[in-house]
Amino acid sequence: MSMKTIRSDAIVKLDPKPRGRKKNLEDLPPFDTAAWCRLCERTYHHTLLIDQISEQIKQDPDVINWIRATQDVKAQTSITTDTDQDTDTEQGHSWLPKELVQKLCDRLKETPQFKGISGRIFTSATERVEEIYKSWIATHQKLIRQIRGKERWLTIVKSDAGLAENSNFSQLEIESRAEQVLSEIEAENESEDESDDARNRRVFNTLFDKFDTTEDVLSRRAIIHLLKNGGKVHWEPRKPRRRKGNQDKSSQPMTLEERLAAKQIEIDRLEKQLLSQLPRARNLFPDWAFEEALDDLLTLPDPDLARHNQYYFLAFSLLIHQSDPAQNIRFKQHLLKSMSFLWEKPNSLLYYRILIFSFLLYTTSKQKHLQFGHYLLRAIKVEAERVESQFYDWQASITPKLSEFLREPKSLPYPISFGYEGVRAWQTNREGKIFFKLNGWGDLIFEVRCHRRQLPLIKTFLRDWQTKDQCEEEDQYSGSFMLLRSIELIWKPRDDNGQGDTQLCSQCEVFQQYPGKGFWNECKLSIHWTYDSDALTRQGLEKIRQRKLEPQLKKLDKKQEDLEEKQKLLQCLEAIPQILHHS
């Protein structure tokens, strides 16, 4: 299919007449506050549903196994061996278990907060979650391949102990066979100007393939020998990395057991990194979520009041240097509020108040005096050393969370999708404005606001629906030939020169409890129309016809094959009495 997308704005209004009576579109107000409020509430429930389904997926203990399942055990795998070479692999197709998202959605459907919600909300949420995780797995293939490759290397190398118990090959025999295997791999190489990295990837891929396909114990042990030695027959012992400040120069090369343990640690670290990058929930109420996340981040280990002040001071010193001053204003405001609350308590230390205040003046001033800044940093270091062990343990615990915390979550709701069959009741008013309704949302009417370049396509959507709606028989006009395929309702920030903040109606309890601003009063409604450009020409319509006939023809061919097999079987059965008679 040749899918393309056009964009337009839209205005939502309440249906002014009861069902069954003719709508007077000229009487609709230019902006309907009640309709906007109703649409925003449905959008809120749609996003909340997606976030809760996603959160349940992330909390499932089997989520890492589902990720592993994306890489077939016998597929070419990207590995990182002790020589740190990577290989490529095919992307896995399956990801989440079949019908998992639907089951989670059905379970949430029975909860009080989602009672009475339109069925289209649940359908769209299910499709959106599957799309989110499908996109996530595609963008994280490199890390997944790296984990899978390390796991595969570890599993194969560990199997050498079992093979050694059931065989008595000498080291010389293993190395001799390893040389033969390596020669066979090099003989298969047709590229003359191959880089070292490409050569290593090809060698490791081939070694894995050979290990999976051979049953010969000597060959398997030779392959393991090559994998352990970085694709070489003779291994140069690798010494462990020494940390800075380590004066021990008598470090011995790592044993195989140490290398295996180090590889397992690498796998565990990468898996934690991967799980920490799972899709994040959208934040429709940013101020509330920000303060809750900050309170969780700054959980202090010692309730002692004086040390409590020290921790907060040092935490602020640490975080303000790692945050972007332009994008984390709320972050600093919350810290200031928290510290001012502590200062009002009895037994607060005057020294810390002065030091914190000086630090605030220094960090917020336009002119930086290096001597003063140097003094402040020295004072910070002195206070850190007083509680060195506890403070640095606490600092180490929050540092990995900082990058995730300081990354602002998206505050716009998820798009709501409708298939072409869900867009109905197209009509125009006397001024030529185009309106439509959505399945399950019969109380709302959407007015299209588009550019004149997009107007011909929008009018074609209108004519297609009217043609299909006027057909006496349901199958007389196939939906496959309709130009429109789907739409998405999307919320986008309004331009500065647009209308003022949208005033919600008095019934909109969800948003009136929130003191800040959000998508409901800072965004406009846009529609993304996805259409099949093949439906615009006769040749394209013929392509659509062939695509539609292809699965039917395959079914007919399959039925024909089954019929022929049954006829052959019947002929064999009919021939049995004659064979018995002659015998």
Image (spheres, helix red, strand yellow):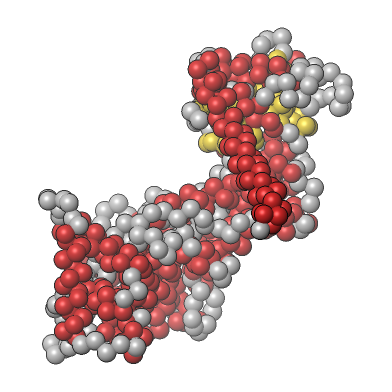
Query: Residue drawn 16% across and 84% down?
Result: 172
Q: Position of residue 140 (x, y in %)?
A: 41, 56
Q: Looking at the picture, tell me which residue is in the foreground, 2 or 61.
A: 2
The image quarter containing residue 398 is bottom left
Foreground pick, 36 / 416: 416
The answer to whether 14 appears left or right of 210 in the picture is right
**In which quadrant of the rendered view does residue 385 lie?**
bottom left
Which quarter of the picture shows residue 418?
top right
Indicate the position of residue 51 as horizontal and vertical percent values: 60, 54
- Identify which residue is drawn at 66% across, 11% down: 432
Q: Is residue 56 visible?
A: yes
- Compared to 578, does 545 lie above or below? above
Residue 38 at what x, y percent from top left?
A: 73, 38
Question: Left or right: 429 with respect to 75?
Answer: right
The residue under the point 87% across, 21% down is 21
* Marker count (numbered): 0
138 vs 392, nearest the viewer:
138
- Horizontally, residue 398 falls left or right of residue 23, namely left
Q: Quadrant of the C terminus?
A: bottom right
Q: Does residue 348 appear in the picture of this structure?
A: no
The single residue placed furthest to the front in the displayed view is 582
Q: Residue furthest top?
A: 430
Residue 554 shown left or right of residue 583 in the figure: left
Q: Residue at x 52, y 63 (%)?
A: 66
* Along the line of sight, the residue nearer the viewer: 365 or 466: 466
Instruction: State the image coordinates of residue 483 (x, y, percent, origin top left).
Output: 59, 23
Vertical side of 237 occupied by 513: above or below = above
